[in-house]
Image (cartoon, rainbow, N blue to C red):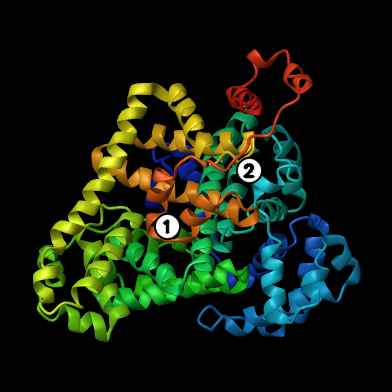
Amino acid sequence: MKTIRLIYFLVFLGYIKCQILQRSLQDAAMKYLKSQNYLEENLRDITSIMVAQFLQKVTYEDVQTIVQELLNTAEKCKGFKPHESPSECSHQMMITFLEHICNNQGMVDKYGVSDCCNKNYTARHKCLLSHKKDDAEYSDVFQIPNPEQILDKSCETDKENPGSVRERYIYETSRQHPFLYGPTILTMSACYETAIESCCQEDNKTECLQIKLEPIRKYITEMSLRHHHLCEIGNKFNHRIAKAVELVLLTKKQPKADFSEIAKLTMDTKSLHQTCCEGNTVECVLGRSQLMNYTCSKQAILTSKITQCCEQPVPFRGECIINSENDDKPDQVSLTLSRFTEDQFVCKQFIEKQEEFLQEFLYEYSRSYPELAVPLILRVAATYQNLLGKCCKLEHPLECYSHGKEMLQRVVNESHERVKNYCDLYKKLGDGNFHNWLIVLYYKKVPQLSAQELVVLTKNLAAAATKCCPLGDEKQFNCIEDSAKLIFGALCRRHEAEPISAGVDHCCDDAYAFRKICFDDLQGDATYVSPSLPYEQVISLEENLCKAQEEKIQTEKLKVPN
């Protein structure tokens, strides 16, 4: 049996030197290699994820009861085989689940979903999705146990009931991260279970657990944010934007694959993301398994970087492929790209098949410049589209768009210059002063945020600068752009839930590719009137504030009007 190595997975996590974690991941993967039919054997866990993500306040015991009832009635899912289409099983499971909720009046009242149950199937499904809240909004409900509590319960429980440790972890992770894709939860649950089993054998169990669980926690948090962001793009913007994001990501990872193969994978991946975002965990897990199997069967024409990933079992294979490094850029791609500014038939193709033509441009540009961040590539594509929209109306369009190469390079240069100036200021001010500068800056931009929200927003921006600015030029730029899209994506979801201002609304809704630029340039809100603060509230600030943590100090400062 081949040794299972999770090198790419560890590189992504940034813990390649942590040999203990590497062994945990290897052991977890080895355990699942013995499975004859992972999907069928783990249908209970997959269904548990779906239930806990939709009904976040349901107890662990109630989730297990609901899951058992669903498995008893979902006939299409019994005896399911990996090569079969997941659609019948997953569709029946979702219908059965929604009916189960709404046919139980006690459950309807208890979890406040009566508004959803008065709707038809499609509307009911969307309504229940809108009830999902991420972990930050449920911080008072979710209590994360410390390592001692975990070990006290888990080491004994694992002896008495093998598998229950993993099931508990799946339940807690699912309800804390309702937008995290099921396959990722399954992968991390296996790693968590292996870490517990290993640490229960150690003398210093607490230290062991802290070392092994921290990278798992960080990965879960990171991927939850990314998955939620992808879902937001799919929901807020038209299908072309979601498709463009997928096409760029796939091309950057597999630049040697031809356009037709990337286009097919783009459609399959976009469809899969939509399924996962709709909370259909059964189809999400089964669909991704089949997509990754297809990817592995096409290694020769897609990428040379996933050989070790394809040796791994489900669900590790998919997680590994997603986090594998980009393949090497093919030779002479710049010659192929030049046709978009030099070919005399550009306008004919643009007018007759605009969407396909622009997808080809995205593909060629992404494989020519895989080092650039996704938002920047989308800004370049939007600039090119606007250029052709203007030039192709002229009598001699070639004279107009032949200057396109220089124009597109200006978009890249301007974006690089913004990041350079940002990082130069960070280096000049240092961590603490830079965070203070961000607080003042964003208090002017979005004064409607609460003190706590403003501190968290600026703390995330400051953390991104701390992480990204010390990197080399290209990595620095990519890192800042990638972090900004997630941070501003979270701000836009906050705005969606409770509108902040017209300026924020414009930045969030106008153009996804220019979201960072818009927030960078957002001016102070002159219409905002700061609420007055009674004198009694000012003097009631805690006497020991000077001893408080930095974040609390910043929050308390913001409560006092300037």
Q: Which residue is mark 2?
A: 196
Q: Are marks 1 and 2 in contact (CB under 8 Å)?
A: no
Q: Quadrant of residue 119?
A: bottom right
Report the number of discs: 2
Kindly identify the residue that appears in the image at 50 percent across and 72 percent down: 272
Q: CA distance from mark 1 to mark 2?
A: 22 Å
Of circles 1 and 2, the one toward us is 1
How crowded is the residue under tag 2: few (<14 C-alpha within 10 Å), some, or many (20+)? many
Image quadrant containing the C terminus: top right
Mark closest to the chain's N terminus, 1 or 2:
2
Left or right relative to 465: residue 138: right
Q: Quadrant of residue 67?
A: bottom right
Q: Secondary structure at mark 2?
A: helix
Closest to the observer: 320 or 491? 491
Q: Secondary structure at mark 1?
A: helix
Kindly identify the residue that appears in the image at 34 percent across and 35 percent down: 422
Closest to the observer: 240 or 322? 240
Q: Quadrant of residue 73?
A: bottom right
Q: Can you see residue 419?
A: yes
**Three-letter amino acid code of the residue under disc 2:** Ile
Q: Up-down: is 510 above or below 399? A: above
Left or right relative to 37: residue 365: left
Q: Which residue is mark 1?
A: 320
Closest to the observer: 453 or 83? 453
Residue 443: image x %, image y %?
53, 35
Q: Can you see residue 1?
A: no
Residue 269: image x %, image y %?
44, 71
Kindly identify the residue that appears in the image at 55 percent across and 57 percent down: 228
